[in-house]
Amino acid sequence: MRIPSDLVRTIRDSSNLAALTGAGVSQESGLRTFRDKLESSSEAEKPLWAQYKPEDLATPEAFERNPSLVWEFYAMRRLKAGEVRPNPGHIALAEIGQRAPHFTLITQNVDGLHQRAGSTDVIELHGNITRVRCTHGCGVFTEWIDSPGGVPDCPQCGAKLRPDVGRFGELLPHKELEQAVEAARESKVFFSIGTSGLVQPAASLALMAKQAGAVLVEINPEDTPLTPLVDFFLQGKSGEVLPEMVRRVWD
Ligand code: NAD
Ligand code: ZN
């Protein structure tokens, strides 16, 4: 993939960069995006929850209806996230963090792979699957609590615990959203990477950046609803495009 020279110059000359990442950046690590077909996994790998769409599991109602099924869905995703490794896309983003004068990384991912690749101060819009929290609001626990056969109880009040992950239909965490909006508005170049742009309000961050005058860059193997609006569409996998971009801009 060739990175256009005018983009290389623009990035070099920009004092402030921001990026929003989605499930696509972790796809090359072996984590499924929500749009990937489940058929791609072998029958032996298919657990009970696999017959549901993620959209039907990652909701407060689903947790009310069948807590242990939903818990199992998250427990498996957490296990899987722990087993895989950051890919060259995550590593390139961590490098941008070190080399650009000012770079804010905003993610919709809950897998923690950006941090494991070395990114710091990541704004996590949808939480993190390695943490749990009390459904009654006692707080967040950094340790996942395993509970064979059911949903664990809060060690403080006895209410059910839930993964510290945003679910469809829930508001985003206020502080993180505010930080993300500010970073988008202040950026001179805004990257939308590996996200389908279907999940709001994260999807509108790119538009806020554009309205504030940022150059928009999208990295995705496929078109998205954002594609017609971007200044540069770098069509390809983030694990290939991002390392090449870092090499061209900073080497
Ligand atoms: P999405 O599943 O809606 O879209 C993924 C996007 O990534 C698609 O546009 C796809 O074309 C693109 N993509 C696929 N492979 C890619 C690659 N190698 N490089 C770059 N792009 C690639 O994901 P979303 O937009 O993040 O929204 C879905 C929601 O699901 C998010 O809220 C997120 O929290 C959650 N989710 C997170 C994870 C994770 O943490 N790894 C995994 C699945 C879903
Ligand atoms: Zn509690």
Image (cartoon, rainbow, N blue to C red):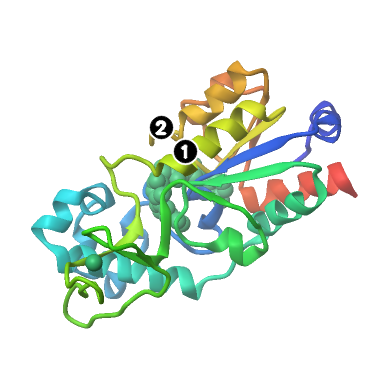
Relative to 203, is 48 on the left or the right?
A: left
Residue at 79% over, 48% down = 246
Residue at 49% over, 75% down = 83
Residue 81 in view in this figure:
yes
User: Where residue 139 sits in the image (x, y, percent)?
Assistant: 33, 62
Q: Which residue is most to the bottom?
A: 148
Answer with the quadrant where ligand 2 appears in the image: bottom left
Residue at 70% over, 56% down = 94
Q: Ligand 1: does it lie within 8 Å of the C-beta at label 1?
A: no
Q: Is residue 31 above or below residue 228?
A: below
User: Where residue 220 sits in the image (x, y, percent)?
Assistant: 57, 40
Relative to 249, is 74 on the left or the right?
A: left
Q: CA distance from mark 2 to mark 1?
A: 9 Å
Dot 2 falls on a residue whose secondary structure is loop
> Is residue 24 or residue 216 the one in the foreground?
216
User: Where residue 176 sits in the image (x, y, percent)?
Assistant: 48, 43
Front of the two marks 2 and 1 = 1
Is the C-beta separation of discs 2 and 1 under 8 Å?
A: yes
Give the residue type at disc 1.
Leu
Callout 2 crowding tier (Cα within 10 Å): few <14, some 14–19, many ≥20: few
Residue 232 in view in this figure:
no
Q: Mark 2 or 1 closer to N-term?
A: 1
Q: Is residue 40 above or below residue 220?
A: below
Dot 1 falls on a residue whose secondary structure is helix
Give the residue type at disc 2.
Pro
> Is residue 58 or residue 235 the one in the foreground?
58
Q: Ligand 1: does it lie within 8 Å of the C-beta at label 2?
A: no
Q: Which residue is mark 1?
A: 177
Q: Which mark is residue 201?
A: 2
- Where the N terminus falls, by quadrant? top right
